[in-house]
Amino acid sequence: MISDAERKMQFLFSLRSRGVTNKRVLNAMEHVDRKKYIRGTFEERAYEDTPLPIACGQTISQPSIVALMTESLDVQPRDKVLEIGTGSGYQAAILSQLARRVYTVDRHSQLVRAARALFELEDITNITVFSADGSHGLPEQAPFDKILLTAASEDPPGPLLEQLRVGGIMVLPVGQSDKVQTLVKILKTEDGLTYHELRPVRFVPLLEGLGKENF
Ligand code: SAH
């Protein structure tokens, strides 16, 4: 039997071998234990580089994709970051290691409550979790230095582009659900928006409104 400690070492090794070289990102991923964000039968596979099922029919993303998205956002220590799609809370926990403040939103209140409880348990104090349709963003907290979507939309939602600071970066999967989507990085400058396509990805879709357990 190999121990969790050995599995964690293999986990970091496999991230490196998949091209994750950014030291700050690797450091953050070393500090956040993915196993804590996965409950039940799939815990066993927490250190594999694969997406896994979580509650509400959602998924925790593949670690090498979490790393790529985090690296692409170029998170700085003073940044205020918005994440749409809290899910397990894993990506938000990674961001919280690198940023000043993280706001994260999910349409499923069950996931929001579980993530909140987990952050409290882990003593993470710079994440605020909201239950809402994230495509409207969080106007009261705007503008954001960085915005990350972890659910795919056909187009970048307008309110989110508005809530991104000039000089800011947005990273999101663009495309229709169940088709191949493209991870896109958007830079907002004085002159407008520039788009860079990063790689094909597959995420759950960004859905309208709140999850049904909210009613
Ligand atoms: N970042 C997560 C993985 C997210 S899976 C992690 O690290 O585990 C995508 C999440 O997006 C799901 O939890 C889903 O409920 C959420 N989602 C989908 N559409 C949404 C919307 N319009 N607003 C907020 N959250 C949404």
Image (cartoon, helix red, strand yellow):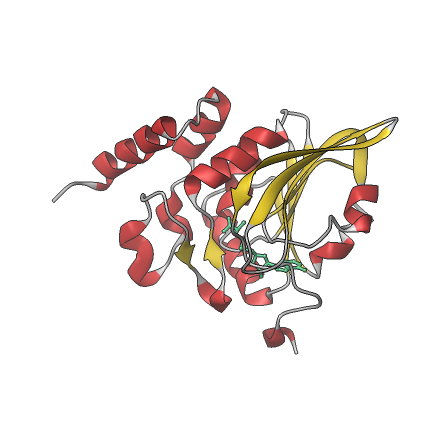
Q: Quadrant of ligand 1?
A: bottom right
> At x 32% / y 32%, what residue is drawn?
14
Q: Residue 139's x, y, as percent?
A: 82, 49
Task: Give the side of residue 90 with respect to residue 3, left or right.
Answer: right
Q: Residue at x 68, y 30 (%)?
A: 79
To which quarter of the image does residue 210 belong?
Answer: bottom right
Q: Position of residue 39 (x, y in %)?
A: 37, 59
User: Of all residues shown, which one is farthest toward the bottom?
Assistant: 215
Q: Is residue 53 above or below residue 196?
A: below
Query: In this rendering, does residue 124 appear at all?
Result: no
The front one of 155 and 210 is 155
Front-lying residue, 104 or 198: 198
- Residue at figure coordinates x 34%, y 27% from the top left: 17
Q: Quadrant where the C terminus lies?
A: bottom right
Instruction: Please identify the residue farthest to the right as the structure is shown.
Output: 191
Percent position of residue 1, x then y: 11, 45
Q: How many marks?
A: 0
* In the image, farthest residue toward the front: 179
Task: Answer yes or no: is residue 167 visible.
Answer: yes
Q: Position of residue 6 (x, y in %)?
A: 22, 35
- Residue depicted at 64% across the width and 39% down the height: 184
Asked where in the image residue 176 lies, by quadrant, the reply is: bottom right
